[in-house]
Amino acid sequence: MLEFTPRQMEILERLLGLGLRPIAIPPYESALCLHRGQCAVVLAPIDNAGLKVLAPPSVLIDGHFAVRIKRPNGDVFVWKQNELPATGALLAELKIFSDDLHATLKTPPIT
């Protein structure tokens, strides 16, 4: 189980205030995974500091991180044989999620 410093708890409370919620995501069950809507991120504590991003924010498919792939007929998010079109609405949701996350963590977004 993760133990957090007061600073890390403050950051976590701000993330929860933005609507992010804990979730177990295989194979990251021992890490801090947070999601909002269709988006999720894996975080880890930094010794004597805040939290850092372990896996860039992505979209969930069936409770698993999906990978964005470029296809001739348009980008998709994929997990195993499941695909989700990378629509403008979904990409906007992911950008807002990422921007909120990085503004709270005070880190630059991963592009």
Image (cartoon, helix red, strand yellow):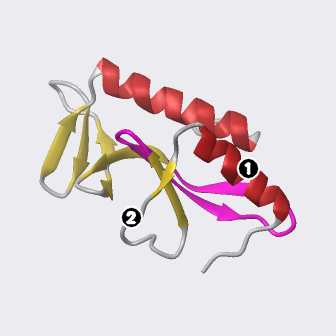
Give the structural element (helix, strand or loop) at label 2.
loop
What residue is at 73 percent from the left and 50 percent from the top? 11
Looking at the picture, tell me which residue is in the foreground, 106 or 12: 12
Mark 2 — residue?
25
Looking at the picture, tell me which residue is in the foreground, 61 or 2: 2
- Which residues lie in the magenta part? 36-56
Which corner quadrant of the image does residue 32 belong to?
bottom right
x and y, in percent, of residue 61 in the image = 25, 50
x and y, in percent, of residue 3 in the image = 71, 75
**Numbered disc in front, either 2 or 1:** 1
What residue is at 32 percent from the left and 18 percent from the top? 88
- Mark 2 Cα shell of 10 Å, populated few (<14), some (14-19), many (≥20): many
Magenta span: predominant SS is: strand
If the image is split into quadrants, where does the C terminus sit?
Answer: top right
Please tell me how many numbered marks the rendered image carries: 2
If the image is split into quadrants, where does the N terminus sit?
Answer: bottom right
* 75 part of magenta stretch: no
Q: Amino acid at mark 1?
A: Ile
Q: Are marks 2 and 1 in contact (CB under 8 Å)?
A: no
Any mark on residue 11, and which? Answer: 1
Task: Left or right? Give the position of 78 relative to 88.
Answer: left
x and y, in percent, of residue 91 in the image = 38, 26
Q: Is residue 87 above or below residue 83?
A: above
- Give the residue at the far right of this rendering: 48
**Residue 15, visible in the rendered structure:** yes
Q: Is residue 60 above or below residue 22?
A: above
